[in-house]
Amino acid sequence: MDVVKLILDIIFYPPIYQLLLIGLVGSLVVVIFILWFERKATARVQRRLGPYHVAPRVAGFPQLVADLVRYAFQEVIIPRTVDAGIFILAPIVATILSILPIAVVPLTSNPGYWPVPMDYSVLVALAISTVSPIFLILAGWASNNKFSIIGGVREAFVITAYELIAILSILAASATVLSFNFVDVVEAQSRIWFIILNPLAFLAAFLAVLMATSGFPFEIPESENEVVAGPFTEYSGLLYGLNMGAAYMKRFALSILMALAFLGGWAPYTPGEGILSGYLIPSIIVIAKATVLMMAFSFTRSVYGRFRLDQALDGAWRLVFPMAILGFGLALLEAYLGVV
Amino acid sequence: MSGDGGRVYVGNLDRSAKRAKDLVMGKLRMGRAVDWATAFSLWPVHLTTSCCGCEFAATWSPRFDAEQHGALPWVGARQTNMILIEGTVSKKMACAVRVTWEQMPSPKFAIAMGACAIDGGIFYNSYNIVRPWEIIPVDVYIPGCPPRPEAVARAIIELQRKIRQKRVVSKWIEEGWRPDKEYVAPKEDPCSWWRG
Amino acid sequence: MDVEELKKRIEEALGGLVKGIEEGKGFIDVIVDLDNIVEAASRLKELGFDHVKSLTVIDYPKENRFRVIYHASSYLDEELAKYIVGIGADVPRDNPRMPTLVYVWRGVEFQEREVYEFFGIEFTGHPDMRPLLLVPQLAEAKPLRKEFIVKEEPIIRVKPPTG
Amino acid sequence: MSVWVYGEQKSDLKIEGAIARRIAEDLYEVFIGPQHPGSGHMRIIIRVDGDIIVDADPDMGYVHRTMEKLSEGREWIKNIPLFERMAIHDACNVTVSYVIALERILGIEPPPRARYLRTLLCEINRIAAHLYGFGIFGVFMGHSTMYMWSFADREVMVELAEKLTGARLTHSYPIPGGARRDLPQDFPDQARKAVRYFRRRLEEYRKIFLDNPVMRSRMEGVGVIPKKVAAELGVVGPVARASGIKYDARLAEPYDAYDEVEFEVPVFEEGDALARAWVKFEEIKQSLRIIEQAVDWLEKHQREAPMHPKFWERSPPLWKKVFEAEGRVKLLPLMANLKLPPGKAMARSETARGEIVYYVESDGKTTPYRVRIVSPSARNAIVFKYIVPGYRVMDLPTIYGSIDYFPPEADR
């Protein structure tokens, strides 16, 4: 009995269930939806059908499930030249780390359902979100493949460019309310969302998330025409599936951060008591907003090609970084004027 | 966890894998699901061996759109499970075909496209070509020079039917090797010119 | 400018180097001695023939020679662009060596490598004399020489079955 | 060994722009291809210093199918489908000059109707091949929409060609002394419809690809070939014309009906990848003009056998009946054992990727003594060695795509 109780205790420890329910299950559902949507939307722009025959009645929705199951049952090749330990661990750790920010953000204003004390949640969430790319670089390095290493190095370049922007622009939201508490940030948006108050910071954050998750036009580390699959060139089977999933899960986690910081979180709704009203409905609202953001991200695929590495870095440092700083200044100004 | 020389010590992997296989394929009866998933997720690797690549490209163009069937040309050999030989395979290319085939994780399939891939076609007496079936086991042949895109799409559907009706993938996973097809080992090393 | 005038201009430019001028359909071949070919080609280039369209080699096993012709033409001079002028020489089959023209026309670099592997003609002074298209083992067989024979399937006429 | 770097000058090479310096031994050597999404059927061995390519060595021959040797054992007419396999998406353009060379040895000229028919198919093929090039170019720069759009619209032209010849790609349309088939009845209307459709679509291409800021920033100033270097390296086609060389085989030595139709040859001065894309774009417009003129001419003039009278008179009466009923010229029986008088001829034609040159030598037998083919891609391959060094790794696909290199054609 004690063991069962212990397991139940662990599962119902707030950060864990939020990670499992929203982080793992929620992100899996959203990622499957988004990948399907991305393929269908791109197909629509390109005047074709996209995945269809796998299940014609639902327009090929289970296509991603088929791909996932196929990957899960494919041979996992570990080449003799790789550093096997890191090679296997890196994608697993990267995947876990990329959804970890979800464990420390509030999805409701009801303190009973906060996973952790919220006083410094903005800082903690941002800090955790910056860890996972290191494991992608490690994955590239451990693969001992030239394309992987080039891809890993590119990843490193891109990280240095986007991380500061992402942190600055999301901190702008917390600067407006002069608090590191995510709940304060969301509550302050009950009248007017920060996307309207501070569009500069939102735009900078949008671009930073695109760069962070290799979305077009910044799909540089995995740019297939020079470096095959970037850091993941040597990965096969489930490990590759994890790697691909990690990028989208990270996009999901960052989208949730953005939804909280700029799109008002659970804004039109006021969470009440009980698990339904206090936790599930507000979190579904947040996830829905994050999904809308991700749909916007996936449209860039059909419109743009990709930038060159130096152009992307140039743009990030010369254009987006000042924009993020301006956004931060704007936030401070608004805080000074007491707009919110 | 990581030992010297890149070895990993995590217990008896073979036994764990066998038990996992028994659980998934035996008790949970995932066989059909795996067949279904693989049939609708045949990703050809990007290896254009010859001029049939024109029609290969057209097959994935909006007019014919083979992505409908779940097939998506993918970049690296490690992430794919199908190789589409497009026409003639020259002696230099034979090495690339074999290496790519060996890089791909099983279960994997091959489609040979065009008359040249069957028996040389118009280049039957060329001194620089190799028959693809000498290097890799081919599942479906497409006649034509070049075959129309519809024929390529048809070959993909045919392969899907084969996988699902003969339950190729689930048997492959259960038995550890492919039961319905002989393993093709090239008689002479296609890369001998490269190794010198 | 017509062909006769062009011939005259070439003969003037090349001086005594010209051994003979052969006229084909759509081109002129200027034949020079093997030793003079670099000099002749440089003069032809000064005349305005700035690129090589085709490095043509024909094998004449009975006469024990290769005919090597650089078919040049002009990009920058629109008048000369209408003509293809070949500068060529005979290379003995038993000692297939000739000086390279890479330093006259850079564009022939890959074509000379091709000739090297298909005919076994070695271009002395070429910066990078390796086989281009063939695997090294095949390049030793020199497949475009006439003694390399590929099998041909004959057309067999079968009478249709009656009845 | 020395390594070429763009931008400086070295003495032993007479090329401005491409030059050499010695490099350290421990450079990063990357083998790109043949199983690589950024290279078709070839391998490019590049050495990288940081992100800059210092040395590129194209390793060709992965699609070498020995056409020159095989042609020596086959009858004259059988070589047409053989040579077509060099570039099946541009079939008429690559074979028409072989046919012209045969006609020169035979001393015949095709009748005007055949010349216009060939011109028509050549231009249809040119548009299809340019769109193919655009598609590959697009996918090389990660712009999958460009690939999909241009391959979708290419089907329009492929269908026109199919209507005219009966085959999607391998038409085998020109034969010595004429063309294989006359215009189908409803072809002119369909062709005009296609031309109208393309005029509208080209604007959308310009918006999403050529004027797309991301794409422009990738293409501008990348892979610059100055005019003198272009002439020195002997590059052809859109690559030469983007560098300011006004050379087009259709102008220099007009074949078929090209001296009778009106068209312009677009020439750009910049010499970079963007200019090459623009040349192709403008050439599609000119090809549309030629298609219109050719269709008008063919509709206005009376139907006659698109075959030289010398051959047509000797054809069986059944063949003539077939032509009158269906507008189809069956391959004449005498073609199978066609004997050419001894002689040698050269002919050039402008394919989509540049000029193709055939040298044909006959010794009076039913098979050629020697056929030498120099295809445009074979001549453009040298760009990899001399122009790529000095650019970044990510520029390699841009340059590759912009010169529209097609390996089966280069390797023959």
Image: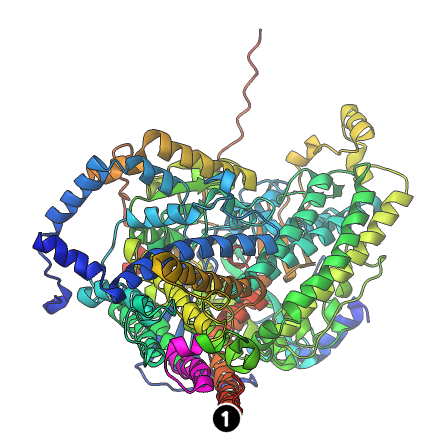
Tell which of B123 and C145 is nearer to you.
B123
Image x and y of residue D63, in percent: 47, 54
Q: Secondary structure at mark 1?
A: helix
Left or right for C20, reference A2: right
Could you classify mark 1 by the number of other residues whose Cα lies within 10 Å: few (under 14), some (14-19), or many (20 or more)? Answer: some
Tell which of D185 and D23 is nearer to you.
D185
Tell which of D85 and B106 is nearer to you.
B106
Q: Which of the 4 quarters of the picture holds residue C130?
A: bottom left
Image x and y of residue C95, in percent: 43, 65
**The N terminus of chain D, quarter of image:** bottom left
Q: How is the image coloured?
A: rainbow
Q: Main secondary structure of the magenta part?
A: helix
Residue shown at 81% from the left, 62% from the top: D263
Image x and y of residue B160, in percent: 41, 36
**Residue B173 can be seen, yes or no:** yes
Above-or-below relation of A35 to D244: above
The segment highlighted magenta reads: A158-186
Above-or-below relation of B135 to D233: above
What's the residue type where badge 1 is placed? Tyr
Verify whether residue D215 appears in magenta. Answer: no
Residue shown at 18% from the left, 65% from the top: A85
Return the residue at label 1: A336
Verify whether residue A164 appears in magenta. Answer: yes
Q: Chain of mark 1?
A: A
Above-or-below relation of D338 to C51: above
Q: Which of the 4 quarters of the picture holds residue D311?
A: top right
